[in-house]
Amino acid sequence: MSKSERRVGTVSRGIRCPIIRTGDDLGAIVTESVLLAAESEGFELRDRDVIAVTESIVARAQGNYCTVEDIAEDVKNKLGGGTIGVIFPILSRNRFAICLRGIAKGARKVVLMLSYPSDEVGNELVSLDKIDEAGVNPYSDVLTLAKYRELFGVNKHEFTGVDYVEYYGNLIRECGAECEIIFANQPKAILEYADHILNCDIHTRKRTKRILVANGAKVVCSLDEIMNAPVNGSGCNELYGLLGSNKSTENKVKLFPRQAGGLVLDIQERILKATGKHVEVMVYGDGAFKDPQGKIWELADPVVSPFFTDGLIGTPNELKLKYLADNDYKHLSGEELRSAISDSIRKKDADLKGSMASQGTTPRQLTDLIGSLCDLTSGSGDKGTPVVLVQGYFDNYTND
């Protein structure tokens, strides 16, 4: 390698920004923040850099909020206000509890059906070991609250210390609704208790709704069909409703951002005018990865990235360097090996799907991979970096 050759590959930088409020010109703020960071830290923007903006500040700039009362009215109008089966919610004070408050206010009685041993994104109600010890088959057995307590007692979440069974039950009753809790994993189990159903699962919602309708449910709404239009002048999300929402205040929910395709193009154009560089831009939410300790799968948003520029469409098309080194060029070393691998990269096919030399590379959407990197970079607390600049992501071993 010469001294002028690049020694660094992908770099991910959290970009500090002002606190965003409703009505702010987010395109201008993001652009200025990235340019000021480049000046301050002494780096330059390059073509195909990625500027990623967290969904939270996009929704805040849009003023995309609704209240518990808005949710209650929408639920009552769509599900009748009587007994409602609420099935497969995730266990989260930030993500679901405030939505449940609105749901309960829109019903006379809630039959809450929790999946077990964990929710959809991996939050445990009870360990698999305890399930095995009790001789319970979670794929077929329906448990009442009394049976659950008899078998498993009180189980507090490993990270939050909350007994979500008790917490959700109390919350429903505090909102003036009767509450019955059962545990099951087959959607049709709820039909023994209610025929007006709100299915709250995220990534399996279409299948759940299909099963419920096929088995005789009178009314079925998925969570993406609640707050999918304004209620009393509220915010909404036409595609995802309450999915992707989280707590703003004790009475208000921040919804997933809507109609932000223009924002990513605006930022892209502003950067081009300011620097002459063509960057890609995306809005990102939860990354898609799993915690090995708590077994939580991070993706509580309906998608990692709801809006992005066209250069982020598709999946990586990469060769596995160690495969080439250990197989095709196992007889080479040093500069000969480097030269041979570099030549293979330059000549690689436009689509390597099925190629042995691409096995072990990550076959996921670019937006899911980059969004996960950005989510880990920005964090979810007080870092103050709701914008992330990713440089060198599209480079390979041959780029200087």
Image (spheres, rainbow, N blue to C red):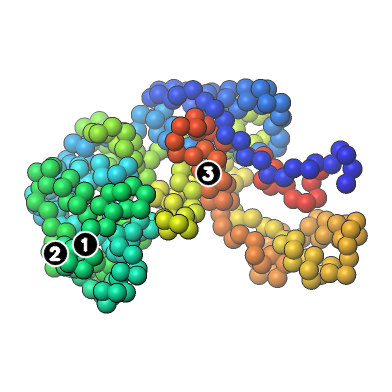
Residue type indicated by callout 1: Gly
- With 127 as the anchor, is 391 left or right in this view? right
The residue that disc 1 covers is 153
Query: Which residue occupies 26% across, 69% down?
Result: 186
Residue 363 in picture, x, y percent from top left: 59, 60
Kindly report the distance in space between the C-alpha atoms of the residues bearing marks 2 and 3: 40 Å
Residue 190 in picture, x, y percent from top left: 18, 65
In front of the other: 128 or 378: 128
Query: Which residue occupies 13% across, 68% down?
Result: 192
Element on which disc 2 rests: helix
The residue that disc 2 covers is 146
Rendered image: mark on residue 376:
3
Neighbour tally class for label 2: few under 14, some 14-19, many 20 plus, Cα within 10 Å = few
Q: Is residue 18 visible?
A: yes
Where, quadrant-wise, is the C terminus in this rendering? top right
Residue 351 in picture, x, y percent from top left: 68, 62
Residue type indicated by callout 3: Leu
Element on which disc 3 rests: helix
Neighbour tally class for label 1: few under 14, some 14-19, many 20 plus, Cα within 10 Å = few
